[in-house]
Amino acid sequence: MDAPVTAFISETYGSGCRHFQIHARKAILQGLSPKENREIPPLNYDFVRRIQKDFPDAEFVLNGGIKTVQEVQALLVEFPGVMLGRAPYSNPYLLAELEQLVFGTPAVTRMTVFEQYRDYMEEKMREGVYLKHMAKHLLGLYTGLPGARAYRRHLSTHMHKEDADLSVVDNAVKFVTTETYSTPDAES
Ligand SMILES: Cc1cc2nc3c(=O)[nH]c(=O)nc-3n(C[C@H](O)[C@H](O)[C@H](O)COP(=O)(O)O)c2cc1C
């Protein structure tokens, strides 16, 4: 994070941009793959803190390495917003927890999330979308809860078949027996 980024922000700010989302890592364009660039270069939240001070009437949304509700809670005290990429991708229930925390919506169970998403999949399948393209986003829904592995295994074994229908997700969810309104610390 350094002069070229500041110059870029300055230029776009000069053109009227007031909202930035910053991945707080310096990308190394030669030698590291995009995946490695999301892991190897160290996180530098201080850069975002500094740039926010330099441009006080713009908002800088912090991205990179944020994994938990607690981290979001702490970071939202000093940043106007945070962006999460991989964490909700592997644990989509995090979004339900964050919705509750940030927007004050009532808590929902994973089963409610599952049922709402099932309705969505049903509608999309009528339009010709394959189950596998949607069910993959359910893989991490029960992460950390008893039965999660069997649930995940059932989904990943059966959702790829061309004729896979909603019975795949209905049978997968039968493996899960416990509900909580939070993300367990340890993965099962
Ligand atoms: C599967 C995947 C796809 C991504 N695609 C893009 C993309 O198309 N454009 C982009 O600017 N960043 C992309 N990113 C990077 C994310 O926007 C984000 O900056 C990065 O994952 C770091 O945040 P995180 O630590 O919360 O995951 C992608 C990340 C993942 C995991």
Image: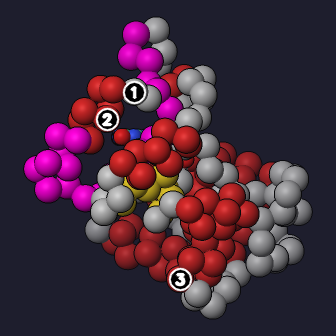
Q: Percent from the top left, x then y, of residue 3?
A: 33, 26
- Which label was assigned to residue 6? 2
Please tell me whether mark 3 sits on a helix, a strand or a loop: helix
Q: CA distance from mark 1 to mark 2?
A: 6 Å
Please tell me whether mark 1 sits on a helix, a strand or a loop: loop
Query: Relative to the observer, which residue lies in front, 52 or 121?
Result: 52
Q: For the point 14% across and 48% down, which residue is it?
A: 14
Residue 166 shown left or right of residue 2 in the figure: right
Q: How many marks?
A: 3
Q: Residues within 10 Å of mark 2 (few under 14, many from 20)?
A: some
Q: Quick one: quadrant of the N terminus?
A: top left
Query: Relative to the observer, which residue lies in front, 69 or 55?
Result: 55
Q: Residues within 10 Å of mark 1 (few under 14, many from 20)?
A: few
Q: Which residue is mark 1?
A: 2
Q: For the point 40% across and 10% down, which residue is it?
A: 30
Task: Tell me whether circle 1 and circle 2 mark residues in contact (CB < 8 Å).
Answer: yes
Q: Is residue 33 above or below residue 73?
A: above
Query: Relative to the observer, which residue lies in front, 72 or 161?
Result: 72
Please tell me whether mark 2 sits on a helix, a strand or a loop: helix
Q: Is residue 158 magenta?
A: no
Residue furthest bottom as drawn:
106
Q: For the point 85% across and 57% down, which residue is it?
A: 185
Q: Which residues are magenta?
A: 10-30
Q: CA distance from mark 3 to mark 2?
A: 32 Å
Q: Which residue is mark 3?
A: 103
Type of the residue with mark 1: Asp
Residue furthest top as drawn:
31
- Which label was assigned to residue 46? none
Q: For the point 62% across and 81% down, which residue is it?
A: 100
Type of the residue with mark 2: Thr
Q: Looking at the image, tell me whether mark 3 or mark 2 is earlier in sequence order.
A: 2
